[in-house]
Structure formats: C-alpha cells, structure tokens
C-alpha cells in the first residue's frame, strides 16, 4: 500500500477505536472526502489487522458515535466495511465530503497532507471552509423567511421516523423531536458568509409544501415519461413537483406501472429486482442533481431501456467505471438524509448495485455518464426472456446472484458450488417454477390454500401440500388455521 495522504488515512485500531479516528472523519468531511482504513500501520507498509473478536464492537461504536449529536454535528450515517488481506481483517470506510462544516466534540478539523488539523480557533481557516462549501453546494442556501407553517412537518415527520427505524433498528431519530431531527440532519443552518440563519434548500426540498418549493426553486420538476407506443410524443406522463419524500413514492410507482417486475430468491427471500433498480435510479435523480438549474430532470421509459437525465456539476466528467471511480456527493445533506431513511445506500454502492442487478434483470449493463447533464441508461428486456408467466426470473437466468458475486462480476466459490453440471441453480439458491407461481399468487391475493395451489401448479393435492411444506420449512411462508381451514401467507 502507498502511504497516507490528503484522501487516505491508516489507523492501527487492533482492539478499539481511538478519538483520532473520528478526527479524521471530521477532517475528510470538511475537505475532499477520503478513505479510512483500520488495521494498517500509518505508512501503509504493514497490515496489522483488527482483532476478529473486536470487529463487531468497533463497527457498532463507529456507527453509534457518528449518530450521537453530542459527539458529531451534524450527525453522520457511515458504516465500516470488512475486508480480508493476507489473512488479516481490515475495516474500511469511504467518508464523503459534507456540504456542512462537521464538528467532532465541538472542534473543527481540516485535512492537510500531514493529517488532521484542529482549526477551531483559526477564524480565517474556518471562514475558508464555510466559503468553499457555500460555493460548492446549493443545498446549503438559507431561506430566512421560510417559516414552520410553510412546511409539512406534521404529516411527513412520522413517515420519516417510521422509515428510519424500519431500515435501521434503534435509529436515534425515533426518540428525537422534530427540531432535533432537523438540526441533526443539517436542515437548519447559520450561514457564516451572509450572517443569515434559517431552513436551507435541503429542508425546503424534503419537507416544504409545494408552494414553498416553487417559491425557492421555480424550475424544480421531475418529468417522468413513458414512450413505448407513441415514439413522437408519449404514452403516459407524470410531472412531479412535490417534496422529495412524496416524489420518491410517485416516481417509484410510475416505473412500476410501466415495467415488468422480476423476482429472485436471495437468502431465502423473494426480491423484486425491478424495485432495486428503480430505487437506485429514483434516489439518484432526486438527490444527486443540481436543483437550482432550469434543466428539467427526466425519467424516460422506452421499449428497451430506461434513461434518466439531470443537470450536474461534474468533478470527473465521462463514463463511470464501477470498478474505478471516486464517489462525490452533489448534495451531501440530501444524500445523508436518504441513507438514514433507507432510500439510498452508502455513497458509491448505488453504482455497483445498478451494475449487479441490471445483469439479473436484463442480462445487460447500465451506462452512467457524468457531464453537465448526468445520464443513466438501464437496458430492459421487455420480451420476458428468462422470465416465467408470473414475472419470476427462471433458473437459467439465475447465474447472476448479485450480492453473491465477486468484484469482477463472477460468482464467488461458495455460490458456484450450488450450480449443477447443466448450469441450473440448485434448490439452495433458487426455487422452481411451481414455488414461484405460488409466491406470485400470494403477492396478489395475500393467502393461498392447498386446493388453489394444486390448480396453479397443475399437480395433485398431495404434491401441492408437499410444495407448501417445503416453503414453510424454508421460512418463506407460514400456515394459519388447521386441517381443511389451513391457509398460507408470506412469512414476515
């Protein structure tokens, strides 16, 4: 490994986290972002490794400290990833730059080539950070005349708490007041350049009533178009001008309406591949775009592809390579908020998810190109090849098992062992067409009995009961009732 630098920091941390780890997180956030690696000597020459018995405790301490408003302001949602190098465990994390000045323990740290520097008492350097961030991130713009009555906090805050706690158990927002959530998420700022204080553009976009959003950013719109039959105009269109929380649901619904759903069994759970792809596409166009631009953001569903376009402020223009790119958040406050409510993942994972799951969905690869206009193209296979009549991916397509794949796109050894000689997946990683048909019926009707199962799979009642027993044993469905009144529902 090369040594430390402006965007790379090594720490030994064999058994516990030291405070200087969090100083580095703060300094990376305040400068250009960077990679933090635990279990490596400072010069990168020796991999000391993290004690396996301490890994879970270190991970938990890291997340809890970043989410503790008494330690970090604003709070951050980052997680340590685990890697094995030369038989030793290394924990790592990419820390993205933040559009706010991030304080740790009430102190401000900045990153230099020599490491982390406490600049709290250096008013000139603190002012430079504020000016740099104000110039780079429009989401920080303060609207001092936006008042509580202009926001839909009463309706949206319970939704936000529910999403946060559903995706991350014991999320700190569960017990926070509305004001505490707003401030910990960086939605209320004091602008040290203008001297103004108030709700910023990120708060307006997340919680503002439609008229407030229109007042603060007159050109804000996401234009969703389905152009499959009428190629000169459109078959269906949805103009979304509401807050980002509701906009996400509306755009997800639009994609669901006009694309084929496909399911895959991952870790014993039937997963909608279309929903995963749509989530990445929608969260990107809502969060990672320049909202002050007059260029309308677009989602276009065509016969064989989905295309998105949004205005961008590119740092490294060109096609994005999932194996070699440096993620850079265009709106860190919004990105962090979506991560907290489970509608986005840690920065950079969305690109990798698109590549992995698109292979499952259509067998192709997406294309992401950054420029003044950021474009995503996701190929579709609407002919239904490799998909049965119920929308489930058939066995011969299941060579692509997304989060069982190695970085080079090939199956890892522990998955390939479950592939039989004829190239079909064994029962350990796939379900047969009969079980898929049952799950499709359950998705629509909510419950099923043995008699209905026999009709769907066109087999004897005894075979139907055996298939239902297999699904029950696998924890995919549960039975309710007894004997002739026994029904089956999807396991929760």
Image: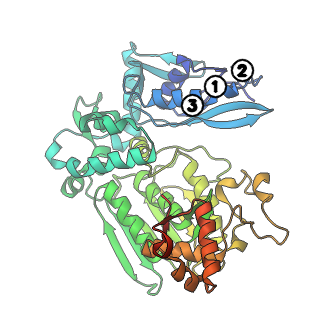
Q: Residues within 10 Å of mark 3 (few under 14, many from 20)?
A: some
For disc 2, the marked residue is 43
Horizontally, residue 286 falls left or right of residue 423, namely left
In contact (CB < 8 Å): disc 1 and disc 3: no
Give the x, y percent position of residue 235: 40, 83
Which residue is the extreme one toward the right?
A: 421
Which residue is the site of mark 1? 54
Residue 104: quarter of image = top left
Q: Which mark is residue 59?
A: 3
Judging depth in this view, the residue of 392 and 369 nearest the camera is 392
Count of number-bearing discs: 3
Mark in front: 2 vs 1 = 1
Q: Position of residue 415 (x, y in %)?
A: 75, 56
Q: In front: 273, or 315?
A: 273
**Which badge, 3 or 2, comes first in the chain's sequence?**
2
Q: What residue occupies the far top of the structure in this picture?
A: 121
Q: Quadrant of the N terminus?
A: top right
Residue at 58% in and 83% down: 454
Q: Nearer the viewer, mark 3 or mark 2?
A: 3
Does 91 appear above or below 449?
A: above
Q: Is residue 260 visible?
A: no
Q: Dot 3: what SS?
A: helix
Asked whether disc 2 touches disc 1, contact meaning CB atoms under 8 Å apart, the reply is no
Question: Going by the picture, which residue comes out furthest to the front?
Answer: 483
- Label 1 sits on a secondary structure element that is helix
Cα distance between the residues tagged 2 and 1: 23 Å
Residue 428 at least partly seen: yes
At mark 2, the secondary structure is loop
């Amino acid at each position: 490994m090369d040594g430390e630098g402006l965007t790379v920091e090594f720490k030994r941390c064999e058994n516990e986290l030291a405070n200087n780890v969090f100083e580095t997180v703060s300094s990376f956030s305040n400068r250009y972002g960077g990679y933090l690696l635990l279990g490596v000597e400072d010069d990168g020459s020796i991999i000391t490794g993290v004690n396996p018995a301490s890994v879970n405790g270190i991970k938990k301490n890291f997340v809890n400290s970043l989410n503790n408003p008494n330690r970090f302001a604003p709070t951050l949602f980052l997680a340590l990833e685990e890697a094995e190098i030369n038989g030793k465990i290394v924990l790592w994390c990419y820390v993205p730059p933040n559009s706010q000045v991030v304080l740790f323990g009430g102190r401000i740290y900045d990153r230099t080539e020599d490491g982390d520097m406490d600049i709290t008492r250096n008013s000139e350097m603190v002012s430079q950070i504020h000016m740099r961030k104000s110039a780079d991130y429009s989401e920080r713009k303060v609207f001092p005349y936006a008042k509580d009555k202009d926001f839909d906090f009463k309706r949206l805050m319970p939704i936000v708490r529910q999403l946060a706690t559903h995706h991350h158990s014991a999320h700190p927002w569960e017990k926070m007041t509305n004001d505490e959530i707003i401030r910990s998420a960086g939605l209320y700022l004091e602008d040290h350049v203008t001297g103004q204080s108030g709700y910023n553009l990120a708060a307006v976009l997340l919680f503002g009533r439609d008229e407030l959003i229109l007042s603060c950013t007159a050109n804000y719109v996401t234009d969703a178009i389905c152009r499959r039959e009428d190629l000169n105009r459109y078959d269906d269109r949805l103009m979304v001008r509401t807050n980002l929380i509701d906009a996400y649901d509306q755009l997800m619904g639009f994609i669901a309406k006009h694309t084929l759903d496909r399911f895959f069994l991952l870790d014993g759970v039937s997963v909608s591949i279309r929903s995963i792809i749509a989530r990445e596409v929608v969260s990107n166009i809502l969060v990672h775009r320049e909202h002050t631009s007059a260029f309308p953001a677009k989602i276009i569903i065509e016969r064989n592809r989905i295309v998105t376009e949004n205005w961008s402020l590119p740092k490294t223009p060109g096609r994005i390579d999932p194996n070699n790119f440096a993620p850079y958040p265009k709106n860190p406050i919004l990105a962090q908020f979506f991560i907290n409510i489970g509608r986005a993942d840690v920065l950079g994972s969305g690109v990798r998810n698109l590549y992995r799951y698109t292979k499952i969905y259509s067998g192709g690869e997406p294309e992401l190109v950054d420029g003044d206009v950021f474009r995503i193209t996701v190929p579709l296979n609407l002919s239904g090849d490799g998909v049965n009549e119920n929308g489930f991916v058939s066995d011969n397509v299941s060579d692509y098992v997304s989060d069982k794949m190695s970085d080079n796109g090939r199956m890892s050894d522990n998955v390939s062992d479950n592939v039989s000689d004829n190239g079909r997946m064994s029962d350990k990683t796939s379900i047969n067409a009969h079980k898929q048909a049952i799950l499709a019926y359950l998705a629509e009707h909510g419950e099923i009995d043995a008699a209905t199962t026999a009709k769907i799979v066109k087999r004897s009642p005894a075979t139907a009961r055996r298939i239902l027993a297999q699904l029950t044993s696998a924890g995919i469905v549960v039975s309710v009732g007894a004997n002739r009144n026994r029904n089956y529902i999807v396991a929760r």
